Image (cartoon, coloured by chain):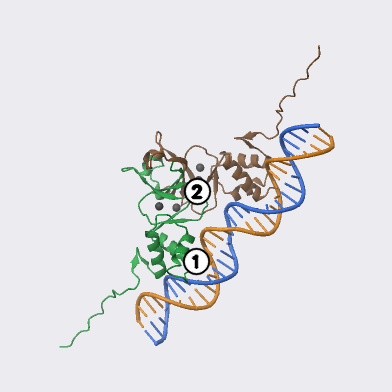
Chain colours: A green, B brown, C blue, D orange
DNA sequence: TATTAAATTAGAATCATTCCTAATTAGATC
DNA sequence: GATCTAATTAGGAATGATTCTAATTTAATA
């Protein structure tokens, strides 16, 4: 009996696994991994400086490209304070940002349990909200 | 009896009245007046274009100076959406901003009566909050 | 291995905003 | 009104985060 050749197995040996449909190149991996272990909400330049240790040839443009790709695929979040350089955050839970003027540090702020922000806002009915941003500035006393 | 000369009256003829301690020059007046009658949260350039009708020689740098002075003296508020050009708002009540993606317009959003935003945030005690910013993006359905 | 598409790189360009500097103006004092 | 001083202005240059461009490299697929 003639032997049928089995269809080749789907390749499982992808060098770069995807996250949220985003192909993870070496550069994206490094950016992602760094942000995951970081609570400080670094800027693109902070990321660049740090990533260069592992990838000395990486360019700042690539860091911006990686950050944008990760943001676009909802893997990280971009955070803006007034007109300062953008910062990046790997905390995907709904949260706000507190900018401590004394130390210059930024802290994630959670909502009290059971609270939905839209509950307290006076919005017209049927409003579709795609994104909410809450920013605080002050001192941690 | 010798007549004493009275000390001169304090001048009441100040050409430029102050608002919140800010001397109101002609340029600042025009910027302020324009913003007071505007709900659209215009950019510095929007203000510039419009003010030139009354003050053809005004410079964009002066518009920025005026806006900064007015913001610094709490006469108007500066509003930022991500990294777009800053916008300016003459509504001094505590409110957030809704960016309607469909039309590109910006709308003030009030809180429901009796609600204080800090009530629903999980902040460490004794935190001093100097400023809160709430930004929404979506569609007015 | 050859083909093709996607990603990266370095540097140039963009553009909102800020800075600088000289000229003008306003306010105070005579 | 003249004089002094400080604030404001106009206009142009500089800044700086981000984006764009063109060339190169890498990855996926055949
Ligand atoms: Mn602010
Ligand atoms: Mn946003
Ligand atoms: Zn965060
Ligand atoms: Zn407003």
The residue tagged 1 is A61
Q: Chain of mark 2?
A: B
Badges 1 and 2: C-beta atoms under 8 Å apart?
A: no
Quick check: can you spot residue A29?
yes
Q: Nearer the viewer, residue A83 or A119?
A: A83
Q: Few, some or many C-alpha atoms within 10 Å of disc 2 (few <14, some 14-19, many ≥20)?
A: few
Q: Nearer the viewer, residue A75 or B109?
A: A75
Q: Are the numbered discs 1 and 2 placed on the same chain, yes or no?
A: no
Query: Residue A31 location in percent, x, y?
Result: 41, 64
Query: Residue A3 location in percent, x, y?
Result: 18, 86
Query: Residue B14 location in percent, x, y?
Result: 70, 32
Q: Nearer the viewer, residue C22 or A93?
A: C22
In terms of secondary structure, where does tag 2 sit?
Answer: loop
C22, above or below A115, in the image: below
Label 1 – label 2 distance at C-alpha: 32 Å
Is A101 left, or right, of C27 in this rendering?
left
The quarter of the image holding the N terminus of chain B is top right
Return the residue found at the far left.
Answer: A1
Residue at image position (66%, 33%) is B17
The residue tagged 2 is B105
Quick check: can you spot residue B55?
no
A20, above or below B61, in the image: below
For label 2, being within 8 Å of ligand 4 is answered no
Task: Find residue B14 and name its label.
Answer: none
In terms of secondary structure, where does tag 1 sit?
Answer: helix
């Amino acid at each position: 009996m003639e032997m049928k050749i089995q269809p080749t197995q789907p390749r499982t040996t992808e060098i770069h696994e995807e996250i949220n449909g985003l192909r993870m190149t070496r550069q994206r991996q490094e950016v992602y991994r760094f942000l995951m272990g970081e609570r400080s909400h670094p800027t693109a330049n902070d990321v660049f400086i740090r990533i260069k240790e592992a990838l000395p040839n990486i360019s700042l443009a690539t860091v911006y490209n990686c950050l944008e790709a990760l943001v676009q695929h909802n893997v990280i979040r971009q955070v803006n304070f007034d007109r300062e350089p953008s910062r990046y955050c790997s905390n995907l839970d709904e949260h706000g940002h507190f900018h401590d003027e004394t130390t210059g540090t930024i802290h994630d702020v959670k909502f009290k349990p059971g609270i939905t922000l839209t509950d307290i806002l006076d919005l017209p009915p049927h409003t579709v909200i795609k994104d909410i941003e809450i920013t605080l500035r002050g001192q941690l006393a």
